[in-house]
Image (cartoon, coloured by chain):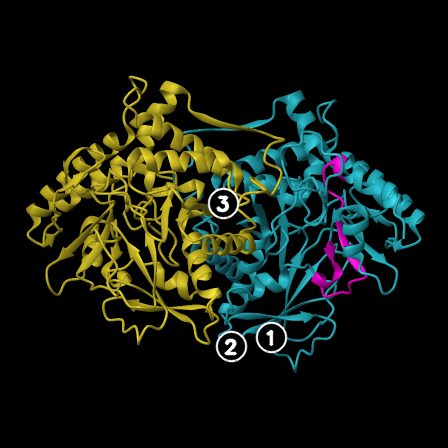
Chain colours: A yellow, B cyan
């Protein structure tokens, strides 16, 4: 999962004088701070051109608050539920059988819904500790703390966490991890532990699908699966019915459900992705995951070449694993590169100054300023510009 | 603003044995508890049939998180902002000049965003009191209390509130009011007061538009304006830039923006409503507000007749006021009827037992069990069934 950076305004292709009137930007700032998944646009353009993929909603549709009044998640469009389950079954990255599907306005809302669901029924006198192993997704602290909830509080790095004789706590397990792309498991393993698995990047373009995940609460999002971040559609697969009902209640109180237009459109998009994975797919419909994986592989190769040229930066290497989806050993190509600069340097500042590229400082992830997170999902021209500048860096 | 009822599952046209297999439901339960605005479906069907009104979004559109990266509300679609302003200007119910528009996932999210924005910068040691004059919208207490925020807390009826020598507090002013349809103004008027105006029903089908509202924070929603509740689109008009920025920040942390599909569709819908209000409108496009007002007027007449037959119930009468939109004196036709049964009776129970109709008990609004709220926005057949049963009630 990626988040828009804190309070600062997003910078997108501004020229150095911050004026918008110059038609040709010679030396624009590149923004690889947030994980805006524009890389996927080219695939969807091609598919739309070839097959006229479009979601049309007549003016009289979707008036009601309800999508499935008798269902546990009364605002979930049945077609979206069906396509979510079909895609997981096709990809093999999560066991959907016996899980309740809860749809959210992006997976951010679902994280809050999960925390609410796990904490509210405990009736603890103090807020429950929420932890995640360092380096953790930069938005967790803020989203957990922003309304100063009495139900839960951010307690930082899971590795240093003392679970105090079985007292309840929540660990968020992000796997593959944002920012560093590593495959993760829970680290505290205390008696009172409750787990939320953020699996936004557990898709075959980013990592090897090694087995179907089957955790208590698993979160996914269209933003990172298909690139449709503007739709704000996330979903949770939840084993326990009571927890699922509480999550639904959170979303009911918070936003009275989730946009139907977005649900119907994402259902269409997931249907196409599933279709593209089938053996008997339309001949010219390229397999979505293979296509995306190839794009990412190229970018990672270019990034590694550029980094090797510099003598200043390093990026992690990842072990190959057997991917049940690809039926082969594959190398991970994470959605973010976790880059490190020489000891004592400020990586984010360096990239901003020398490459005119906005990245997110390691400090935001509970790490050091020698680290920065770089989005690998930008538009082609932005990525190319960044890599060219990085290769040419002088210190 | 209407909300889905608390924890209970919504009941929609179930037969008495709660089986779904009987094709003709002889005696179904009618659900007028929540304010699902299905009344509007017929207008939108007619318009869609005549003009083929439909919002189509190709697969490659709306991938980005951003809709207007340089704008204050970076996730607000410019087309939606434009249509919101155009409609308010056409109707004359709010001054949009010098206001910032913040879009939300329904106006529920915007209420929370407003409370966050007003409280977070005060750095008070204790949660700020939030009040609203009784009878108040039944969801305020729950939405304000559910995550046990340290920033704000629900403090009940505004009329009994002691503002303790200018200490900060927030008053939510709902006008016309949910549940009773009355026009309202702030009642505490204390020195430390901050106001949030929930104007969901300040549209000419429900009430006389007497002058353009120009309060600090004004909330509106497509759910009650056009009937598109499933889209989850609300908007705030905010005078103070700092407050608007903080509201944007809340939505950024809570859901990283608002579905683009829903925004684009509601923009189209508002455009049609504006078009239908113009003098030089297409001849067969009926004025949306006049059409809706006529429907509501008929329902209110039928309800009054049925109530007069019973000797058990009473409903309020409303003064006629000059409506600058209709250019005439008009009678209010609220979206809910606030019905009262004889002293000592339980109104909600009575209607459930005698009319097989779900309504919302007065207790939920901080009032007595002699009162109940009835939605006037249901489908025609539901409303007709209810009124027939009410007229035939025996005690």
Q: Earlier in the sequence, mark 2 or mark 3?
A: 3
Callout 1–callout 2 Cβ contact below 8 Å: yes
| Residue corresponding to mark 1 | B168
Q: Which of marks 1 and 3 is nearer the N terminus?
A: 3
Q: Residues within 10 Å of mark 2 (few under 14, many from 20)?
A: some
Whether residue B182 is visible: no
Residue at mark 1 to residue at mark 3: CA–CA distance: 31 Å
| Range covered by the magenta-colored residues | B360-382
Residue toward you, B129 or B88:
B129
Residue with the most extreme top position: A283
Q: Which of marks 2 and 3 is in front?
A: 2
Residue at mark 2 to residue at mark 3: CA–CA distance: 31 Å
| Residue corresponding to mark 2 | B124
| Residue corresponding to mark 3 | B76
Looking at the rendered structure, whether the residues under marks 1 and 3 are on a common chain is answered as yes
Residue A41, horizontal then vertical, whole percent: 33, 32
Q: Earlier in the sequence, mark 1 or mark 2?
A: 2
């Amino acid at each position: 999962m990626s988040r828009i950076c804190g309070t600062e305004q997003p910078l997108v292709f501004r020229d150095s004088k911050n004026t918008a009137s110059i038609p040709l930007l010679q030396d624009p700032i590149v923004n690889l701070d947030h994980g805006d998944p524009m890389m996927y646009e080219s695939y969807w353009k091609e598919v739309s051109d070839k097959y006229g993929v479009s979601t049309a909603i007549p003016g009289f549709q979707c008036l009601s608050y309800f999508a499935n009044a008798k269902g546990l998640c009364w605002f979930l469009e049945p077609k979206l539920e069906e396509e979510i389950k079909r895609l997981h079954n096709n990809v093999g990255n999560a066991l959907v059988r016996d899980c309740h599907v809860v749809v959210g306005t992006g997976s951010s809302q679902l994280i809050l819904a999960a925390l609410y669901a796990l904490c509210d029924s405990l009736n603890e006198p103090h807020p429950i500790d929420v932890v995640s192993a360092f380096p953790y997704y930069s938005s967790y602290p803020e989203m957990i703390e922003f309304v100063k909830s009495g139900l839960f509080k951010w307690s930082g790095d899971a590795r240093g966490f003392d679970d105090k004789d079985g007292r309840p706590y929540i660990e968020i397990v992000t796997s593959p991890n944002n920012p560093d792309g590593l495959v993760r498991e829970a680290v505290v393993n205390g008696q009172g532990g409750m787990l939320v698995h953020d699996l936004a990047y557990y898709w075959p373009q980013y990592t090897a699908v090694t087995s179907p995940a089957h955790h208590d609460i698993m979160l996914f999002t269209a933003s990172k699966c298909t690139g449709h971040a503007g739709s704000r559609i996330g979903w949770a697969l939840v084993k326990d019915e009571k927890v699922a009902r509480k999550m639904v209640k959170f979303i009911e109180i918070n936003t009275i459900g989730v946009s139907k237009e977005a649900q119907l459109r994402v259902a269409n998009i997931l249907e196409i992705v599933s279709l593209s994975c089938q053996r008997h797919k339309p001949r010219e419909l390229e397999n979505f995951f293979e296509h995306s994986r190839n794009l990412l592989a190229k970018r990672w190769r270019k990034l590694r070449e550029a980094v090797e040229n510099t003598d200043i930066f390093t990026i992690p290497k990842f072990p190959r694993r057997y991917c049940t989806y690809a039926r082969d050993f594959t190398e991970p190509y994470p959605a973010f590169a976790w880059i490190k600069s020489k000891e004592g340097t400020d990586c984010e500042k360096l990239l901003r100054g020398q490459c005119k590229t906005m990245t997110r400082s390691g400090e935001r992830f509970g790490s050091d300023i020698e680290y920065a997170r770089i989005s690998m999902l930008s538009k082609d021209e932005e990525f190319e510009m960044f890599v060219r500048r990085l290769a040419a860096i002088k210190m």
